[in-house]
Image (cartoon, coloured by chain):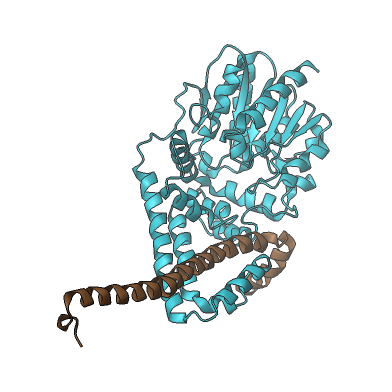
Amino acid sequence: MSLHFTNSEAIWGGATLAGKAGLDSGVWHPQLEAAVANLKEQLDGVSDAAFQKELEKQASVRKNKFLKGLNQYLAHAFEPPVTDAPITYEIGCVKLHDLGGEGAPILLVPSLINPHYILDLMPGRSLATFLRNQGYRPLLVNWGDPGDEEKYFGLDGYISERLIPIIEHVVQMAGKAIPLVGYCMGGTLSVAVAARTEGLISQLVLLAAPWDFNTDKPHPGRRNAPQMLRFLDKLVEGSTVGVDVLQTFFTSVDPTLNDRKFRAYADGKHEGEAVDFFAAMEMWANNGGPLAKKVGQECLSYWYEQNLTMKGEWLVAGLPVRPEDIDCPTFVVAPKGDRLVPQASAFAIAEKISSVTKHVPPSGHIGMVVGDRAKKGLWEPLVNWLEISRET
Amino acid sequence: MVFGALPQEKLCACKKETSSVFDEFFYTHVMTKNTELEEYVAEFLDLWQENIRLWSVDKELLTPDDLKALLSPAFDEQKR
């Protein structure tokens, strides 16, 4: 949230400081050069003072509109959408929610960053509910806040001491190997499990799970990663990193997004269910437990800096994770327009798995799971694939 | 001459005339200029924001190796 304020202030404050002379500066992106030249021509004869006066007025109006949108969101009477499904298993601070149903268990593994309930966001926007209605019994991992033990965990600890025991528990419930759906970072963790365990996973679904961290289209915040890593190095062991720090990565993809989003919200461009959906998404994005320091360090160093996943050198329990060892049918999903996990990064793993189906949903990283086109674009193709690949 | 010194009908005609001239000047020059200026400034601000968005994408394009090369001298210096 604090980042939203800072970005909005920086954008409009910077524009005011630049003034009309800003048009003559060398700051413009090549794609905008023609539009800037055209505006300069139109402004011929307009005094600097008149332009500056109007500029300050309009910049102020934009800042105020951003604040109005933010206030409207904060004042919106909407309960944070937290899954209230019963907890069927608990290990450390990690919980397993049972969303019910009579069908075969299917395990949903979200990212360690941002809350788990994105996979069960609200009525009409819940992948878990859709799966239950299609005859499955979804079980959703809730990573929770790192406790006394998890605070010292790296990725290895979360995989070996949390995810694998959960999978074993669900396999025991099912009496057979289970389908596993991993979303984003949860997908990358799931790869390690699927590649390193036998007889536990019957079908693997990877939803925008990053694998190659050196793609032409970069991961968000790649240029900040080295500094962030050095910052984490200075924290004492057992520290955690708050959601605001992590947001700098996601926000760096487009520092203007939140200003535009909240100004549109203030303009009343959302109606009916869309208002609740906006609030639910913001609450989800602005919440989430902190990340254990060591997890942050390993993501930044092993993945962002060294790309060990792609090199086959990412070690879990002392041994490299090799996607080539995954022997179950795998469904790899990667939206073309994903700005958080580039499509090439998620699809890189598909080249290494023998039985794989690739799918491109028509939305972005989050939209594919909860957006207006989620049902047709992801949920239905996913269930179709589960049915078809189960028979083969 | 002041308006008060004119007969009422002449005063009205004069007021109408000056008002009409003023309106014409105001609406064709002052208001148009202001409306145009508002549009130009709005366009400037839109371009400014779009410029930040476009550069934020481009600036990420350094490869991890480029970044390492860029940053390691600073850290090497610090270690010494």
Q: Nearer the viewer, residue A177 or A316?
A: A177
State the residue at coordinates (47%, 50%): A264
Give the side of residue A333 with respect to residue A267, left or right: right
Give the side of residue A48 with respect to residue B14, left or right: right
Which quadrant would residue A330 be assigned to in this image? top right
Q: Nearer the viewer, residue A313 or A140?
A: A140
Measured as percent of width and height from the top left, residue A349 is found at: 77, 40
Outermost left residue? B4
- Above or below: residue A243 compared with residue A273: below
Q: Nearer the viewer, residue B1 or A205?
A: B1
Measured as percent of width and height from the top left, residue A176 is found at: 69, 15
State the residue at coordinates (58%, 72%): A39
Q: Colour of chain B?
A: brown
Q: Colour of chain A?
A: cyan
State the residue at coordinates (39%, 62%): A61
Measured as percent of width and height from the top left, residue B21 is found at: 36, 76
Measured as percent of width and height from the top left, residue A132 is found at: 57, 18
Residue B79 visible from this viewpoint: no
Q: Quadrant of the C terminus of chain A?
A: top right
Give the side of residue B70 with respect to residue A354, left or right: left
Q: Nearer the viewer, residue A181 or A315?
A: A181
- Above or below: residue A85 compared with residue A149: above
Residue A21 visible from this viewpoint: yes
